[in-house]
Structures are given as structure tokens and as C-alpha cells.
Image (spheres, helix red, strand yellow):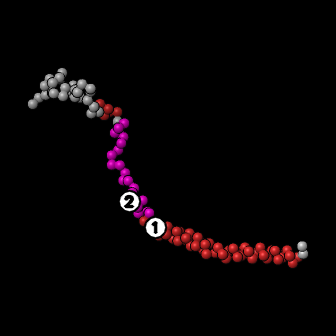
Amino acid sequence: MDTGTILGFTFGYLAAIAGIFILYSPIIILCIGVLIAGGLLQLLLLPFAALIRRLRRRPPPETDPSWLLDRSRQGEVNVRPADGRRADGRRADGTGPAGPVPQ
């Protein structure tokens, strides 16, 4: 193999690479264009995303949930015993240890 053959193969490979690049250049340009268009669209929609995020943010709770842990209010639970008595010991019909309900 002489020098001319090696140079011929080298330029042939370079010509093949250039031909493939030229053949696929529209697809490469299209992909780059889609990436640029997507980035520009994302930049244009950024203010709307911030607005939607601000609108979806929940307001802070108005009541303080610490009342659940307040030990001084533990006896104020509104639960009736199984026999239907009220918190003052009377039955549901008004009779019981404390007597009838005053009218």
C-alpha cells in the first residue's frame, strides 16, 4: 500500500462522513429548532405557572390546632355513654339522678 492509496481511503472516509452529515442535516436542524422552540415556550409560560402556583396555594389555617392538646378542656368531650345518659348524668328522657329537667 502506497501513500496515495492511504490518502485516497482517508479522503474517502472524510467524504462519506461529510455526505452523511449533509444527508441528515435537515433532521439535525429540526431537532435543534424543536429544542429552541420548547425553551422559548417554557420561558413564555413561566409567568402563568407562577400565577397558577400562587392561586393554588392554600391559605394558612384560621384556627390553632393546639386546642386538641389542651389538658384543661379534656372533660368537655361531647360523647354520650352507651346507656344514653347526658354529661350531667340524666337520661335522654330527662329523668335520672338529678331529677326531672326543670321546665
For this view, does 46 lie left or right of residue 3?
left
Q: Which mark is residue 45?
A: 1
x and y percentages locating residue 81 in the rendered image: 26, 27
Local secondary structure at mark 1: helix
Closer to the camera in the image, 100 or 27:
27
x and y percentages locating residue 23 in the rendered image: 66, 75
Q: Above or below — where is 26 with respect to 78? A: below
The amino acid pointed to by label 1 is Leu
Magenta stretch encompasses residue 28: no
Q: Which quadrant holds the C terminus?
A: top left
Outermost right residue: 2
Give the magenta part as a residue range. 49-69
Q: Above or below — where is 31 with respect to 64? A: below
Magenta stretch encompasses residue 53: yes
For this view, does 28 lie left or right of residue 16?
left
Q: Residues within 10 Å of mark 1 (few under 14, many from 20)?
A: few
The amino acid pointed to by label 2 is Leu
Q: Report the residue at 26% width, 26% height from top.
A: 82
Q: Above or below — where is 54 with respect to 9? A: above
Q: Residues within 10 Å of mark 2 (few under 14, many from 20)?
A: few
Q: Report the residue at 49% width, 67% height from top.
A: 42
Closer to the camera in the image, 97 or 5:
5
x and y percentages locating residue 91 in the rendered image: 19, 26
**Magenta stretch, overall SS:** helix
Give the Cα separation between the discs numbered 2 and 1: 15 Å
Q: Disc 2 marks which residue?
A: 55
Closer to the camera in the image, 67 or 87:
87
Local secondary structure at mark 2: helix
Q: Give the mark, 2 or 1, whose residue is nearer the N terminus.
A: 1
